[in-house]
Amino acid sequence: MKQESIYCSKCGTENIPEDNYCSKCGTQLKKNKSNQTRSQKSEVESAKKMPITTILYSAAALLVIGFIVLYSAGIFESASAPVVNDTQNFDDVHKGMGVDLKSIERINLLEGIVKNNPTDKNTIAELAHLLNDSGFKEKAIEKYKQYLELDPKNADMVVDMGVCYFELGRDAETAKNMDETKKYYDLAISNFMDALKITPKHQIAHYNLGIVNMSSGKFDEAKEWWKKTVEINPNAEVAKNAKELLESH
């Protein structure tokens, strides 16, 4: 097999494998690990040319992760600022807005408000939704429960808490933990049924009951809930989704 050229460690001149001394400067060519072959030299030069933007993006990513870890550990301090938020439906939750620094900052602001004003329903509601959307399902459930202690007849909040349980069930199912999956799915169903006790024609609760039953393998029950969803208001967006699911199953 043909040997690769040897490069002078002093002047970088390419020499043939048989040379003991550099043909340009006369430096001894030591045939050990310090000599760079063509491929090694290419790798070193490529590493030196690493774009600064790559380094900056990597640093930014580590910074975001650091903030998330710190928040999870409860280290951040909170401030206050009043806000109101609307209840979301089941499909919106799946889209989620992800976790970013603005969300973390907002969460901490709202935590501060709730800590100082534990009966501020609007802020508790926004905080619960933001935690939900950001993936902090268990923390969101805590806030939904806190809200419902103040307003137990709010069916929308009961439904949203049920969505959190359903998402936790899906995570457990992905992890192949079937006992946890069943526990969370049962809690989700219980929440959606509680919402119907408050508002019997809560369309999203009906739709969500279809989703959970389908995820549990109960297709016939799922179809019945979707049929009821359509009957409540055929023109609603959630009814259109229910129709599509009925047609595809």
Image: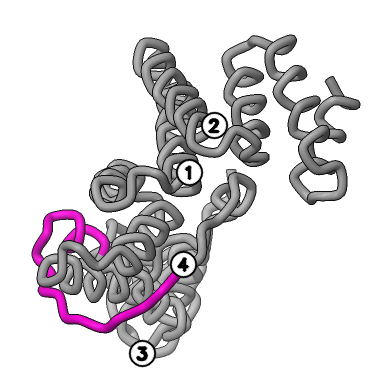
Left or right relative to 195: residue 211? right
- Residue 5 vs 90, above or below: the answer is below
The x and y percentages for residue 34 are: 27, 64
Magenta segment includes 16:
no
- Residue 185 vs 244, above or below: the answer is above
For mark 1, give the secondary structure: helix
Neighbourhood count class around disc 3 (C-alpha, 10 Å): few under 14, some 14–19, many 20 upward: few
**Label 2–label 3 contact, CB within 8 A:** no
Q: Number of numbered discs present? A: 4
Q: Can residue 34 be seen in this view?
A: no
Mark nearest the camera among 4 and 2 is: 2
Q: What stretch is highlighted in magenta?
A: 68-85
- Give the Cα distance between marks 4 and 3: 25 Å
- Mark toward the start of the polypeptide (4 vs 2): 4
For mark 3, give the secondary structure: loop
Residue with the mark numbered 4: 43
